[in-house]
Amino acid sequence: NAGVTQTPKFQVLKTGQSMTLQCAQDMNHNSMYWYRQDPGMGLRLIYYSASEGTTDKGEVPNGYNVSRLNKREFSLRLESAAPSQTSVYFCASSGLATRIETQYFGPGTRLLVL
Amino acid sequence: KNEVEQSPQNLTAQEGEFITINCSYSVGISALHWLQQHPGGGIVSLFMLSSGKKKHGRLIATINIQEKHSSLHITASHPRDSAVYICAVSPTGNQFYFGTGTSLTVIP
């Protein structure tokens, strides 16, 4: 099993460009999450999906959109990238949203917006 | 306002030393997690606990719900333990508050 995979690993964008970060898990998990990690700050939740077909905002959703394409895949889209979105993005998944479970993280995507 | 505070921020130890990393939180929680972030950036979950103590190899995690405090101990530390250790708390299944991490360097 690959666990949680993310693509791309690294991306450079110019201000105003758009891109989609892809995430997939093969653990048959119901819940998936997108976080960003910035220096000196803890991981912050951007969006999450408790189950296929549902998505909800997290702590820092502005400037992002998400799609839960199916149970395996959860994508994060930046419609018009800004330098403030330079960060490392992590996707994670867990079994159920209705109880506390261990989260499994992807390897991260480093995004630089110029 | 930080819901989760970790100390110390940075820690350097000699190989073989006993290490303690502390985590205090300010919200009611259902569970607390300890995560390890490797120098390459990957994050793995070490422990999830809601009471008492858990042990896995040389790692021990404890939690005191009344005092809203948890500790992660590493016995007989080794250079391969060098990583960032992150404390996170879950008030509910979809909420996670993360600390900023403790950067540990173990010197041979």
Image (cartoon, coloured by chain):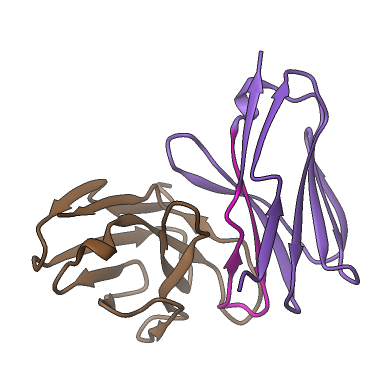
Vertical relation: A40 (above or below) A74: above
Q: Kindly identify the residue that appears in the image at 89 percent across and 68 percent down.
A: B67
Q: Kindly identify the residue that appears in the image at 27 percent across and 69 percent down.
A: A76
Q: Can you give x and y, in whole percent of width and height, for residue A94 in the image? A: 53, 66
Vertical relation: B76 (above or below) A66: above
Vertical relation: A3 (above or below) B13: below
Membership of B91 in magenta stretch: yes
Membership of B85 in magenta stretch: yes
Quadrant location of the C terminus of chain A in the rendered image:
bottom left
Q: Can you give x and y, in whole percent of width and height, for residue A4 in the image? A: 40, 54
Q: Residue furthest front?
A: B1
Q: Colour of chain B?
A: purple
Vertical relation: A61 (above or below) A109: below
Q: Can you give x and y, in whole percent of width and height, for residue A38 in the image? A: 41, 56
Q: Kindly identify the residue that appears in the image at 35 percent across and 52 percent down.
A: A5
Front residue of A9 and B12: B12
The quadrant in which residue A24 appears is: bottom left
Horizontal side of B52 relative to B47 (left or right) equals right
Front residue of A12 and B78: A12
Q: How many marks?
A: 0
The quadrant in which residue B52 appears is: bottom right
Horizontal side of A43 relative to B35 (left or right) equals left
Horizontal side of B24 relative to A84 (left or right) equals right
User: What range is drawn magenta here?
Assistant: B83-101
Horizontal side of A61 relative to B46 (left or right) equals left
Front residue of B63 and A7: B63
Front residue of A70 and A108: A108
Q: Which chain is brown?
A: A
